[in-house]
Amino acid sequence: MKELLRTAVSGAGLVGLTGTFSSLVTALSYLDERAPDPAIHLWADSVLRVSGVKTVCRGLEHLPPGNFVLCVNHQSNFDAMVLYRHVRRHFRFVAKAQLRKVPVFGYALERAGNVFVDRTGGDGDKAKLNEAARQVRERVSVVFFAEGTRSDDGVLKPFKKGAAIMALEAQVPLVPAAIAGTHAILPKGTVAIRPKPAALVIGRPLETKGLSLDARDALTQQAHDAVAGLLAEANGLVAELQR
């Protein structure tokens, strides 16, 4: 009964907060592309608080001063909230196109400047990613969930090449990062929110300047190896929070 009540309260809080902040983000997006950022950060922190989720972060000092591509694993829909709670930089996501169809929330995502792709590798996706690479060079950092989908069990899967390709095309650093614990908060295929801890660990940037697209396979493997090590560290931090 206690867990059912917690889920009901957390679920209602998540839906209510997301609806309210989606409208606010949409309105602010008409002022300036950075104007929604404080509202997005507040939304993430508010949802994590109402869900009883404690988080910890290491490695913020590794983020480069300019724009970057953040290459991170994907465990849960709570991953974005953990990132926005701790990384107070102007960044947006490469997201699956289906999210655009979510009422209110999807439009807010689009207005805020997130990049939607079908993940088919077709010409449409390539054109969107090429345009996104130009934007990364000029004005915004981008987050890639490099596995392409959420992990069912928190175990790291092989990476797609999109993050490496965008970093190479934009000639900006590829920053590896790992999130742990969020798969236990909201497991894939469920709606029950559990008040479990989560951790974010950011690694040292992988430089891309002077490299061509021929380096995409090697860079993808480098990023995967780095994220695997960071994930082990993040899992350790989650274990410490659970004690």
Image: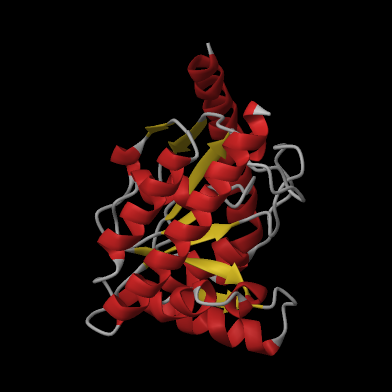
Q: Residue at x 71, y 42 (%)?
A: 187
The residue most toward the top is 243
Is 101 in front, or is 9?
9
Residue that appears at 48% across and 33% down: 52
Q: Residue at x 65, y 63 (%)?
A: 161
* Image: 213 above or below 199: below
Spot occupied by residue 75 in the image (x, y as percentages of width and height): 64, 45
In the image, taking residue 2 as reference, residue 199 lies left or right, namely left
- Residue 112 higher or lower than 154, as above or below: below
Left-right relation of 45 to 183? left
Q: Residue at x 74, y 46 (%)?
A: 157
Q: Position of residue 183 (x, y in %)?
A: 66, 39
Nearest the camera: 164 or 208? 164
Q: Is residue 182 visible?
A: no
Q: How has the structure been colored for display?
A: secondary structure
The count of marks equals 0
Q: Residue 89 appears at what percent x and percent y?
A: 29, 56
Nearer to me, 182 or 167: 182
Above/below status of 186 relative to 105: above
| Residue 91 in view of the camera | yes
Quarter of the rendering containing residue 91: bottom left
- Horizontal side of 31 relative to 142 (left or right) equals left
Residue 95, x across and y down, in percent: 58, 68
User: Split into 4 quadrants, where in the image is the N terminus?
Assistant: top right
Q: Say which of 1 and 169 sits in front.
A: 1
